[in-house]
Amino acid sequence: MANIKLHLKIVKGPRHGETIECLPGSLIRIGRILRGNTFAIKDPGISQKHLSFQFDAAAARWTVSDLQTSNGSFLNGDPISPSAPAPLSDGDSIKIGESTSISISISVLEPEIVEPKKERRGRGRKPRVPEVEPEVEPNVEDDMEKMTLGEWFDRMEKYLPAVINEAAEEIIADLRSKSLKFDEFLATNPPH
């Protein structure tokens, strides 16, 4: 079976121009915050956990699921039902949040052709040096559960400052709203 690769390109919104590549077997989650998601988009209309993409092996195609968001998700202008995954096709467009648009591109990677080894009689010679297999860099974005500790530290070095800033902004906004309520309380109830 050929690998069907999914490419997600942010064509509009805060992460405009960025792409995510997904291979079958990976689960990609998109949300407003990094925790629990593979990819975070800081758009006020996006829920903390908004969308998930995964490959449906039985149907041999990629699907997208809305994770019961309050603002919803739209596939080619139609709302995505939170109860059932929607099948994706090459050229589809997804709209989430206030301004984020994601372009879908699906490509088929042809399997590598492996020639069968010829049968030999006898023991044969062992090669002096074992065959060198090319190193394949894993796509860390695809599956955080299979990440090595070093890859995890590299990812945290990149994304942790953004997560800390986002959490700090949420705390500051919460404190502002509480201080406004306190000021209103003091204005309506002057001290005796």
Image (cartoon, rainbow, N blue to C red):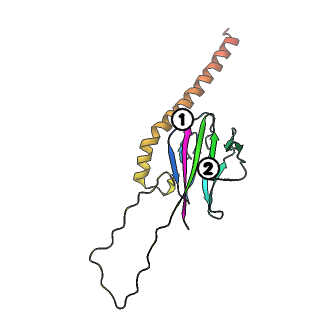
- Quadrant of residue 189 in the image? top right
Check disc 1: other Cα within 10 Å, few if <14, some if 14-19, many if 20+: some
Tell me the amino acid under the disc marked 1.
Pro
Q: Which residues are magenta?
A: 1-11
Query: What residue is shown at x 46% (from left), y 41% (from top)?
Result: 159
Estimate how packed mark 2 is, as few (under 14), some (14 to 19) or many (20 or more) residues with alpha carbons within 10 Å: some
Contact between marks 2 and 1 (CB within 8 A): the answer is no
**Left or right of 111: which side holds 45?**
right
The residue that appears at 51% across and 48% down in the rendered structure is 20
Residue sitting farthest toward the front: 91
- Of label 2 and label 1, which has the lower sequence position? 1
Q: Which residue is mark 1?
A: 14
**Residue identified by numbered label 2:** 52
Horizontal placement of 101 versus 133: left or right? right
Front residue of this view, candidates 7 and 174: 7
The residue lying toward the viewer, choosing from 93 and 15, is: 93
Q: Verify whether residue 160 appears in magenta.
A: no
Residue 145 appears in view:
yes
Q: Is residue 50 visible?
A: no
Q: Secondary structure at mark 1?
A: loop
Asked which secondary structure carries label 2, the reply is: strand
x and y, in percent, of residue 184 in the image: 67, 16
Quarter that holds the C terminus: top right
Q: Position of residue 7 (x, y in %)?
A: 54, 51
Q: What kind of secondary structure does the magenta stretch mostly adopt? A: strand
User: Which amino acid is tagged 2?
Assistant: Ser
Image x and y of residue 70, in percent = 70, 39
In this rendering, which labeled residue sits more in front, label 2 or label 1? 1
Residue 132, horizontal then vertical, whole percent: 33, 68
